[in-house]
Image: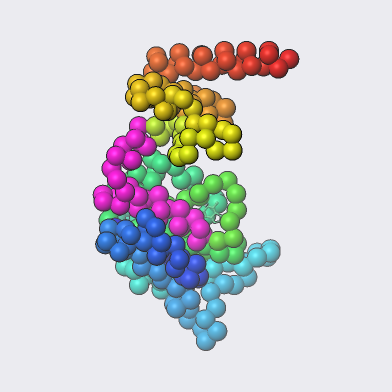
């Protein structure tokens, strides 16, 4: 898959792209990352890419011409968003719709993506109107630019591509996707007086699976209850949730 990343700060990506899973995916050719410096397409001698906002107000706006040049260089022409054809062209912005695993799976079906990293107060609206197919946010907080958000998209999409990580891990993950992870332990069995839960040492796979499911449900219930509300829980899961609630009530009573 090809990722075209349009940014004013391509150097931010270097270490990340050379390390770990993403580095390996690039070396093995599962992904190609094309970093495009928007400044290379600035038109004036100062290579300026930002300007004051019309109507007044604090902050600067990314000028349309350098961005249009960078988009043209990666084969994106104006009008794509209206025709619904061509490459998905994504603008990373806190004003976008929230990225979740379902959206990531959709993006992983594409052959090529264009990611525009905003800076300052944002980009000229005419670029969004003419070129951008998706506006995505990676969370309800404001980053100093779209680069970290672009890395989130790159990472979450790449790991779903064939060959990038073991398909067993993905299967397990998608099965449990709408629940939070159960706790994980590795050696030693005892660390600073705390032992690994005995059930994990028992070798009883059914018991271990039940323990993990219960831990996942309890964590989701406590931290992200809305996830439990919107998934269809099995009979076994509902019984476990009832047990978790009973145990929490008992604990509450015991603690006065
Ligand atoms: N740029 C700044 N903040 C962002 C966010 N939360 N998501 C995507 N892009 C951003």
How many circles with numbers are drawn on the protein? 0
Outermost residue toward the bottom in this view? 45
Provide the residue span drawn in magenta. 146-175
Q: Is residue 91 left or right of residue 57?
A: left
Picture quadrant where residue 237 is located: top left
* Residue at x-position 39% and y-position 32%: 176
Residue 76, percent from left and from top:
34, 65
Residue 189 in view, yes or no = yes
Residue 161 falls inside the magenta stretch: yes
* Residue at x-position 48% and y-position 81%: 43
* Residue at x-position 45% and y-position 57%: 151
Residue 40, percent from left and from top:
44, 78
* Residue at x-position 41% and y-position 28%: 201
Camera-nearest residue between 212 and 201: 201
Residue 248, percent from left and from top:
60, 18
Quarter of the image where ligand 1 sits: bottom right
Residue 230 falls inside the magenta stretch: no
Quadrant housing the C terminus: top right
Camera-nearest residue between 6 and 87: 6
Q: Is residue 104 above or below residue 147?
A: above
The secondary structure that most of the magenta stretch takes on is helix
Camera-nearest residue between 180 and 32: 180
Quadrant housing the N terminus: bottom left
Camera-nearest residue between 69 and 15: 15
Picture quadrant where residue 205 is located: top left
Q: Is residue 75 left or right of residue 136?
A: left
Q: Is residue 248 above or below residue 108?
A: above
Q: Is residue 76 above or below residue 85?
A: below
Residue 11, percent from left and from top:
48, 71
Residue 76 in view, yes or no = no
């Amino acid at each position: 898959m090809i990722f075209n990343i349009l940014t004013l700060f391509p150097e931010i990506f270097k270490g990340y792209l050379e390390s770990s899973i993403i580095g390996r995916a690039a070396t093995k050719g599962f992904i190609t990352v094309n970093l495009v410096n928007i400044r290379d397409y600035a038109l004036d001698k100062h290579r300026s890419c930002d300007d004051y906002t019309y109507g007044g107000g604090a902050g600067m706006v990314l000028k349309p011409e350098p961005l249009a040049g960078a988009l043209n260089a990666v084969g994106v022409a104006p009008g794509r968003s209206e025709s619904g054809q061509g490459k998905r062209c994504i603008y990373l912005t806190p004003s976008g719709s929230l990225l979740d695993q379902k959206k990531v799976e959709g993006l992983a079906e594409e052959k090529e993506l264009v990611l525009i990293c905003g800076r300052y107060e944002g980009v000229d609206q005419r670029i969004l109107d003419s070129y951008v197919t998706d506006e995505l946010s990676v969370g309800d907080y404001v980053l100093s630019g779209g680069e970290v958000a672009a890395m989130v998209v790159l990472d979450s999409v790449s790991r779903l591509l064939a060959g990038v990580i073991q398909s067993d891990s993905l299967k397990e993950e998608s099965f449990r996707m709408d629940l939070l992870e159960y706790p994980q332990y590795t050696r030693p069995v005892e660390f600073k007086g705390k032992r690994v839960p005995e059930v994990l040492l028992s070798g009883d796979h059914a018991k271990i699976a039940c323990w993990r499911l219960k831990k996942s449900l309890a964590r989701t219930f406590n931290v992200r209850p809305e996830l439990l509300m919107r998934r269809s829980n099995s009979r076994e899961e509902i019984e476990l949730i009832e047990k978790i609630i009973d145990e929490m009530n008992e604990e509450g009573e015991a603690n006065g």
